Each structure stands twice: as structure tokens, then as C-alpha cells.
Image: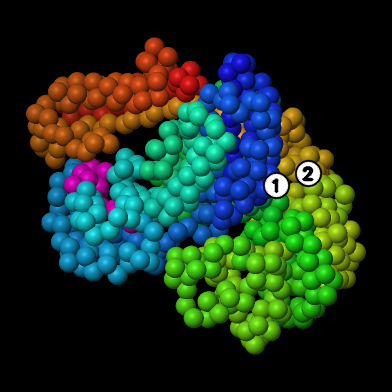
Amino acid sequence: MKLGLGIDTGGTYTDAVLMDLSDGSLVNSYKSLTTYPDLVTGIRNTLNGLDPKYLKDINFTSVSTTLATNTTLEGKGYPAGLILIGYSINNKVPSDHVLSIAGGHDSDGNEIAPLEGLEELREFILENKKKVASFAISSYFGVRNPDHENRVKEYVRKLTDLPIVCGHELSMSLGASERAITALLNAQLIPVVDDFIKSILSVMKDIGIDSTLMMMKCDGSLVKIEEAVEKPVESIFSGPAASLVGAGHLTSLEECIAMDVGGTSTDIAMIRDAVPQIDEQGAIVGGWKTMVKAIKMRTSAMGGDSHVWVQNKMYIGPNRVIPLCLAASEYPSVIDELESSDKYSTRIMTESLQSTTFFICKGSRSHCRAMADLDGQEMEILDAVGEEPTSIMDIAKKTETHPLMFTHILQALVKKRCIQQIGFTPTDALHVLGEYDRWNGEASDIGAKILSGYLGISKEQFCANVKKGLVDNLALDLISYFADDVKTKDIEKIMACSDNMTFRLKSPVVLVGAPVAAYKSDLEKTIDGDIIVPDFHQVGNAVGALVGDVIYRTEILIRPSSFGSTQYALFSEKGRILFEDYKSAIEYALKFVEESVSEYMKGYGLNMDKVKFELKRNDVGSMGTLPLETKIEGLAVGSPRRGA
């Protein structure tokens, strides 16, 4: 038996499966809580839950995670500096540390302005290198000529040892703003993915697992762990991609819609002809348009751990919190705190100011102060939050401050990863309704009584409303996935009539995630179709992480070097090369594609006779007998488990 180990670390659970790679059958599985910020503990707990007799015989290990997705959705990426060359971005970008200097090239790769402003750049780096975790560099038309990006990268490298990311290293597509955002998000995620991978390697070493280690990318393919660290933005949808691939494997379906209901988000994607559908336009996550070629998916910031709160009505999300039932399992004092909680006027209530809300500091305060660049007020509030759940009023007493004066500071500390929020969630609602029973349901019950009291309804009705709200969102996401050109509000209006109508989906819907069985029957009231909850749905992501393939894409563009020129410019991931004629450029391109594919696959122990290889050529326009532009694309697919 040839064993493979799949691991998925999500916002709530870390899952693991053992699979016989010879026939794809599952041998063993286990899941436990993800522990943040100390990921090692949760990973170790999960692997220790597997049958130990198998661990020494593991040949191949692959991992996936939603940490990058959740980090971007919640706006909690590590701070990164952005250096723009030859242009600026008028719209808001996800960074407070941005510099624009002179330089840049045109669409033919010719320099249109010399690189200037290095002294200004030096001051920017020295001022920010202790405030950020990394730097991103993006030059105008850097994909057509990366010279300025490379020169700035070398200059920055002399001033700091922080990670540096260039836009041309991540995408060959045009679009200066999107490329800059992609590079910036990548820089922000480097510490997140690096910490995850180091945690995996640490536990594997401690347990004695000596095997190949790979990671799933957001297009459903696998890469070496070293490449995953260099380009963490490509793992933004790693977890959802794994759930999609896992859904196909668990059901043996070559066409299906996968719906992954996690703690932080709900993700929907599709497989056709056993291949994940890819969004060629680039993934959108957390409202940011990127150039990352990922599975075509719809993701919403609503899941089992979304915060349920009240004011004059009930709200679900958008923030994720630790469920009351889960917090009480680890800290029984939550029960007494809930029973004696203060009642607030709905006039002043906010998402943070709730009778069922607590905050907890589970990490190192000194490390948080050093990394998060806290001001005096933030440090005072951080010191008032205990290592056990602390209520709003407890914080108010310690700081002698009215809650309305510091709730915004609490949210800032949550965003900076210094503290975590505890509150009522859909998972708590399922505990009260008796449809899910994993944690301390007594805390859920008390929380439901408190919140329902504000609305003047029973706790059962309140929890039924919470469940309906989440299911309605699942149905809305499913419909919107196939009607992405229709406004969400218009779809919601149609859904309001769903008592007398349903929406028919031709392809099966496969539900993946811990509590999804509880939502199946309610979802069927709106969605008319084959809705499947497969065996091992709780660990579908870990299954998918194991059954992906290595996929390598390379792209070359050939066009005249300038208007009226007889020379031709070839643009590839390695930069621009000039040729005296079109024929020479084509011959070089074809050879380059085949050699780069072969070299890449050899790195995975795969010879070309074990790889499916496709070469596409697309000529655009004409200039006499020659095309105005030629694009050559190479696509190679191979199974890394053959080389394991």
C-alpha cells in the first residue's frame, strides 16, 4: 500500500486524511481545532488523531489552507510596502505604505522614462522597514520589460532583508493596477503561508514523517513547498480549490458544483470534464481584483463562525468570531459570564458591543506590540484583555472608560491579530436546535436566550432565523454563481418568492464542510437539484489536497519591436528578447516552451512521457504575410504521486 497524507488547515478546523494512492481509497481521517496563532498545536493534534501505525509508511504529503483566503477577506494581511514605478494608483490600495517614483516602459518594452528617485526610495525603505513585513514592486509595463523592477529590487535588497516581490514574477498579463494589487497581496501573505508551512514541517519532523511535501494552488494544481512560499498569492483559494477537487474525488463525478461551507466563508466552484473551471480574468477576493488565475468561484464572508448580533434586528457577519460553544468548551467560565452579562440599550449596540461578546488575547503581548505598531490607546486596551474571555464591561472597568470609547480599538486589535473576538454564531444556533452537537451547547443556549430577548422572540425562533439566514445566503451564492451578470439585489427579490418557486440546477451540488448535513434539507426548499453530502465530507479539503496534479503554464508573446520595425520582440517570464525576423522569434519560442516545460516537470520527478502536454498558437491580425501578434501557450499536466 502506497500511502498519501493530506492536510488542510482552515479558520476553524485542521483536517487530515490518509489515502491509499494506488486506488484512491481513504484509510483514515481526523479533524481537530485550528489553533491560532500557534498553528503547530492544532496540526499536531490532528496528526496525532490518525492511526499511528500508518505514519511511518507515508510516501507523499500535500497540504491546502484557507488561511490566505481568510486573511485577505478579513483584511488581516501583514503590512507591506508598495513601490510603484512610472505611475500611481488613484483608487485605494490595501496598504498605508505606498511610494511612486519615476520610470517605466511602453507596451513594446522600450524605456519611456529613466529610473529616478532612488534617494526618495531609500528614505521610504528606511522609514518603513520596521513597520512592514515585506515589499512589493510594480513598474509600468513591467511585464514587457522588467528591468526597472529588477533594479529597484536589488536596491531595496541592500537596505533590508525583508521579502521582496515583483509584479512581473507573478503574471504576464497587462493591467498595471491589477498587477500592483497582486504583488502587494502576495507580499502581505508571505508571512502567513511561511508560518503555515514551517508549522507543517515542524510537526512532520517531530512525528517522523519523511516524505515529499507539496501544496495546492488556487487553480487546483500542486506545487513544491518552496514555490508556494515564493508565490503565496497563488494559494489565496488553496482551500476552496482543494474542496472542489475533493468533492469530485469523493463522489466520482466528472461534473459537479462544490459548495464548501467553512467557518469564515462559503465558497462555490465547478468541475467540468473532471477539470476545475478557471477564471482567466483573474480572481477577485476581498473586493480586490487580482491577476491570479484561480478556479472560477464565488466566495462570501459568511460561514459557520460568522458573528450573529442584534440591534433592532438580527445580523449575520461579516466578521468571524469564536463560537460561544467552542469558547465554553475550553473556558467554562464563559457560562457564568454569560449568565451575569450586562444588558445594553439597542440605541448604542454595535457588532462589538453585545451582551454575548467577549475578547481574548491568546498570543504573546510583547510580540504583538513589536509587530503591530500599536499606539498608546491600543496598548492600554490590549493590556485590559485577559488570556481568558473578557467581557466589554470588564475592559471598561479596567480602563475606567465607557465602552463606546474603545470598541473601535478592539476591532483594530482584532484586525492586527492581537486579540480574538468570541460571540454567537450559526454553529451555536445549530447546537440550540439539536442539529449539531460537538461543543458546549449550554453556552449556545444562554447566548440564544440573551439575543432573542432583545427581539422579543423565543430562542428557538431566533436560532431558526439564524439558520434560515445562512441557508438563504447559500442559495443566493449558488444562483449568483451562474448569473454573475445579474445584480445580487435582483436575485434576492426573486428568491423572496421562493415559497412558490425553486431554482433548478442541472449539475449535482456537493456539500463539503463539518456541519453541512444540517443545511441540506433547507437548501432543497430553494434549490431544485441533486444535493449530495458525501462520506468524508467533513475532511473534503484534505482529500482534495492529495489528488491534485502538477500543472505548468507558460506563455510567450511575439510582436514587432515598435511600429514599422522589421525586428520582433519576444516577451516571456524571463523578460524581453529582440530578434531580427519573425521566423527566428517563432523558432526560439517553440524551443523555449518545450524546454521550460521539460525542466519544470523534471523538478517533480516527471519525464515528459509521463506528462500530458498541449501547445497552442494564436495569431492575431496581419501585417502583410505575417501576423501582428502571436501568442504561444504551453500547458503540461502530470501526477506528482508517480514521482513520490
Disc on the earlier residue, 1 or 2? 1
The residue at the point 35 percent across, 66 percent down is: 130
Up-down: is 209 above or below 590? Answer: below
What amino acid is at disc 2? Tyr
Residue in the foreground of this view, choosing between 282 and 17:
17
Q: What residue is shown at x 32% (from left), y 64% (from top)?
A: 129
| Closer-to-camera residue (161/625) | 161
Q: Which residues are magenta?
A: 135-148
Q: Give the answer, above or below, for where 175 lies relative to 372.
A: above
- Give me the residue at 44% from left, 22% from top: 637
Q: In terms of secondary structure, where does tag 2 sit? A: loop
Residue at mark 1: 474
Quadrant of the rendering where the N terminus is positioned: top right
Q: Which residue corresponds to mark 2?
A: 519
Badge 1 density bin: few <14, some 14–19, many ≥20, Cα 10 Å:
many
Residue 387 in the figure: left or right of residue 287: right
